[in-house]
Image (cartoon, rainbow, N blue to C red):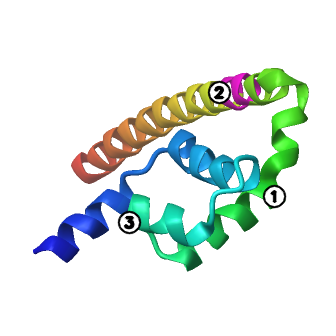
Amino acid sequence: MTEDKHDNQRRRLTPEQKIAILKAHLVDKKPVSDLCDQHGIQPSVFYHWQREFFENGHRAFTGNGKRAHQAEAAQQAKIERLQAKLGKKDEVLAELMEEHVALKKSLGEA
């Protein structure tokens, strides 16, 4: 049961906690083995975080999130336009189906 608790703790680390652990090694020069023991993580997990950190670090310098916010707003506007368009198509389809059923009934009764 102790191992299960250990596994759950590893999965619950926030991005901020992961960065703090990486910083403790990179800036404060704490050994990876000590940090891994302290936080209950495997060294392979630590090195995975480190690789991800360096591969994606450039995002920290891309306009203080303004671009990301603008892109998200544009994406949301596009979604809303497409939802409105889909709603109109549903209305048209419903009208056509209603007319089709009415025509079938009139032909069947004639």
Where residue 90 appears, x then y in whole percent?
48, 36
**Residue 99 lies in the magenta stretch:** no
Q: Are marks 2 and 3 in contact (CB under 8 Å)?
A: no
Q: Which residue is mark 2?
A: 76
Q: Residues within 10 Å of mark 2 (few under 14, many from 20)?
A: few
Q: Nearer the viewer, residue 73 or 80?
A: 73
Q: Which residue is mark 1?
A: 54
Magenta residues span 72-77
Which quadrant of the rendered structure holds the N terminus?
A: bottom left
* Mark 3 to mark 1 CA distance (whole Å): 22 Å
- The first of marks 3 and 1 along the sequence is 3
Where residue 72 appears, x then y in whole percent?
70, 29
- From the viewer's perspective, tell me whether residue 78 is left or right of residue 10: right
Q: Which residue is mark 3?
A: 40
- Amino acid on which the number 3 mark rests in the picture: Gly
Q: Nearer the viewer, residue 15 or 37?
A: 37
Camera-near label (1 vs 2) is 1
